[in-house]
Image: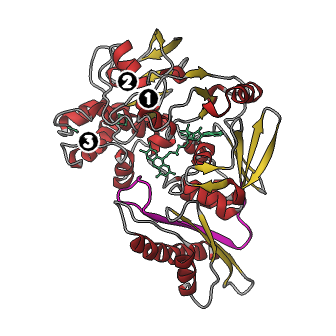
Amino acid sequence: MKPPAFDYHAPAGVDEAVEILAEAGAEAKILAGGQSLIPLLNMRLVTPGHIVDVNRVAGLGFVEAGPDGVRVGALARHSQVERLPELRRVQPLLGQALRLVAHPVIRNRGTVVGSIAHADPAAELPAVLALLGGSVQTRHAAGGRTIPAAEFFVGPLESALEPGELAVSVFFPALPPRSGTAFAETARRHGDYAIAGVAALVTLGPDGEPERAAVACVGVGPVPIVVETPYRAGWDGAAEAVAAAIEPEDDIHATAAYRRHLTGVLAVRALGQATEEARG
Amino acid sequence: MNEITLTVNGSVARVVVPARRLLSDCLRHDLGLTGTHVGCEHGVCGCCTVLLDGDPIRSCLMLAVTADGHEITTVEGLAGPGGELSPVQRAFHESHALQCGFCTPGFLCTVTALLRDNPAPTEAEALEGVSGNLCRCTGYQNIVKAVHRAAELTAEETGPDDDEAVR
Ligand SMILES: Cc1cc2nc3c(=O)[nH]c(=O)nc-3n(C[C@H](O)[C@H](O)[C@H](O)COP(=O)(O)OP(=O)(O)OC[C@H]3O[C@@H](n4cnc5c(N)ncnc54)[C@H](O)[C@@H]3O)c2cc1C
Ligand code: FES
Ligand code: FES
């Protein structure tokens, strides 16, 4: 249970980091908080030739909330983002999800951008980014690009990031007016990855009834699965839409059938809570 | 090999380590501080928890080279200068919050930081605070009691006046 040998790089700036990444190509792994990468190294599930430790890169440890949303730099730790005073007002779903990511001690090191880049379909933050329609800002030796969430998550632990590409920040759009959010999940123990989870966003119409609603489902497909869930005098139709859209699998924790049922139940619960939140 | 400088429990230490050396192994093998225990080496058990610049982290999930230039407090650094136990250590002792003691260094570091940030945690906050640490012996009841007892001891020792001043 020790990491394999690798060449270590600790660039001080983004330009230097992307240069090193370009040279090392597919042999390189970026190290941020290490809360997913170091377990993988310790278990020798990955054996990169080069580790590019970005913890000393200047200018990436920021989190900014503006009227449009929240931008999180690549070195902002989960705990730092959780503590942002404006978070509840600008985008409450991010705080609701962060509380469900591992334990406080893990969140002291783990980064929000790392959680997105890791693209684990069982993780909470990719679902938040997908549901809100956020984006990932990247840099590579020849420039950079903005990748919309809908294109970012490609498969289990697979993102649209190319070798040599550094995610520099992630953008979570603000809560629309008359809207509320909620995150409901079931885990075997507090702090574990969820058996299934659902993030919900509900926007009320002028009559105070839900006008637009959508959920993103966690742990029940290769990527976070976003489903539009119309309100028709109740959320029964929503549960059916969710059960039809997801692709759960059997594993030692739960059967696919149980996950499908559970996700429907969690969707109704999250949509109800989000509606309450929207009504204030 | 990389030469790094760590401030561990207040003393500056210079060590030469390969890049793949985990901080937990650097503390235990290079610096001889075997109070930091190693159980799972993938972040789950919490017995390797130390304070990095005051905040609890898993030392098995950090490379020693990443910690270069930072301050680390291990369980060896929690007692006072004359070796007197800290309020958290005394509370664990008094409340029988350990049996074999394997998990204890991680709990002590975690609870020290928890009470610094939240000097009077509710039952739920105390539970949430220690939820990332596993103990195979005690059944946790006495550990949660010790969190509250440590809060009491700290409050008594700080005194009401100092307490006001802190706020
Ligand atoms: C005990 C435990 C429980 C956990 N429970 C949960 C949970 O319930 N839910 C959950 O979502 N997660 C959980 N995690 C996983 C973990 O918290 C996150 O996946 C992690 O914090 C990711 O961020 P990081 O900064 O630590 O990334 P790292 O571990 O440093 O990197 C993860 C991956 O992302 C890549 N990467 C990181 N930053 C960048 C970047 N800027 N640009 C490009 N690529 C990058 C790395 O190359 C690597 O492939 C748990 C972890 C532990 C140890
Ligand atoms: S040894 Fe570090 S968490 Fe178990
Ligand atoms: S006292 Fe033995 S593991 Fe906790």
Label 1, label 2: how many angstroms apart (C-alpha)?
A: 7 Å
Q: Give me the chain letter of mark 3.
A: B
Image quarter (top left, top right, bottom left or bottom right) of the C terminus of chain A: bottom right
User: Residues at badges 3 and 1 in contact (C-beta under 8 Å)?
Assistant: no
Identified at 78% across, 57% down, the residue is A68
A183 sits left or right of B60 in the view: right
Amino acid found under the numbered disc labelled 3: Ala
The label nearer to you, 2 versus 3, is 2
Q: Give me the chain letter of mark 2.
A: B
Identified at 46% across, 65% down, the residue is A196
The label nearer to you, 3 versus 1, is 1
Amino acid found under the numbered disc labelled 2: Thr
Is residue A181 shown in magenta? yes
Earlier-in-chain disc, 1 versus 2: 1
The residue identified by callout 3 is B146
Label 3, label 1: how many angstroms apart (C-alpha)?
A: 19 Å
Image quarter (top left, top right, bottom left or bottom right) of the N terminus of chain A: top left
Label placed on residue B74: 2
Most distant residue in the right direction? A143
- Please rate how many residues cluster around mark 1, counting C-alpha atoms within 10 Å: few if below 14, some from 14 to 19, many from 20: many
Image location of residue A195, percent across then percent down: 42, 62
Q: Is residue B13 above or below residue A39?
A: above
SS category of the residue bearing label 1:
strand
Image location of residue B71, percent across then percent down: 49, 21
Residues beneath discs 3 and 1 located on the same chain: yes
Quarter of the rendered image showing ligand 2:
top left
B90 sits left or right of B131 in the view: left
The magenta region covers A172-200
The residue identified by callout 1 is B51
